[in-house]
Image: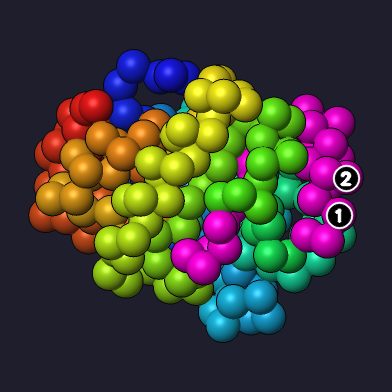
Amino acid sequence: MPSQSTLIAPSILSADLMHLGEALKTAEAAGADWIHCDIMDGNFVPNITFGPIVVQAIASNTAMVVDTHLMIADPDRYIEEFVKAGSNQVTVHQETCPHLHRTVQFIKSLGAKAGVSLNPATPVSTLEEILGDLDLVLIMSVNPGFGGQKFIPASIEKIKKLDAMRRELNPRLVIAVDGGITEENAEAVVHAGADALIAGTAFFRAADPAAAALKIKSASR
Ligand code: DX5
Ligand code: ZN
């Protein structure tokens, strides 16, 4: 498996955006491994968030891995900008990429790690032929578009399926899970095979984010 201890990636979407610098410090002090940037376009998903200039501000003020989640139609148009802005990892949605192999190779050619995300209704089998080329798969455990939604229980079986697939096809693949992660369900998600947990509400809206991160991080297989 790629990592011994669970990686935690706070989603900046749930932070107080008036105080982005403080939010980064809170995440760093809590031992966060990645900072998750949710990019939404009002087209692929119903919500709109922010673009490369905000990612650049984040990337130039943190040592955390900048993990950019593109929930946008035609991501090929913007990948280079997000890498130039300082994204260390770029994740595109399978549902937005008719030429996924080309898109993945493009991300890698720019020097970033390449991830692919799957909506709840998209089967992991759609990644079989590309799995060997990927650095990370992001399983959506809610329908993308908003923070604060409830974890979809069927995601657990899906993570298990992907875990079995990677053993055969790409043991160094990182499995990340995004949406509705809580201190309560983290253990089950990690047990199913997740290496990295994205946490928006459970981290930034916690009374004590550091304590919440510790609890989520301590979830082990
Ligand atoms: C949902 C986003 C998630 C979201 C997670 O579309 O991709 O990253 O911010 O937020 P919580 O942890 O609140 O579900
Ligand atoms: Zn996300």
Q: At which x and y percent is residue 106?
A: 86, 40
Say if the magenta span includes residue 191. no
Residue that appears at 34% across and 61% down: 154
The numbered disc on residue 175 is: none
- The answer, for residue 122, to whether it is visible in the render is yes
Based on the displayed image, in which of its 4 quarters is residue 45 positioned?
bottom right
Magenta region: 97-123
Whether label 2 touches label 1, CB < 8 Å:
yes
SS class, disc 1? loop
- The answer to whether residue 212 is left or right of residue 57 is left
Three-letter amino acid code at the position of disc 2: Arg
- Residue matched to label 1: 99
Q: Is mark 1 within 8 Å of ligand 2?
A: no
Q: Secondary structure at mark 2?
A: helix
Q: CA distance from mark 2 to mark 1?
A: 6 Å
Task: Estimate how packed mark 1 is, as few (under 14), some (14 to 19) or many (20 or more) residues with alpha carbons within 10 Å.
Answer: few
Label 2 sits on residue: 102
Q: Which residue appears at 54% of the width and 79% of the height?
A: 47
Check residue 106 for magenta coloring. yes
Front residue of 17/164: it is 164
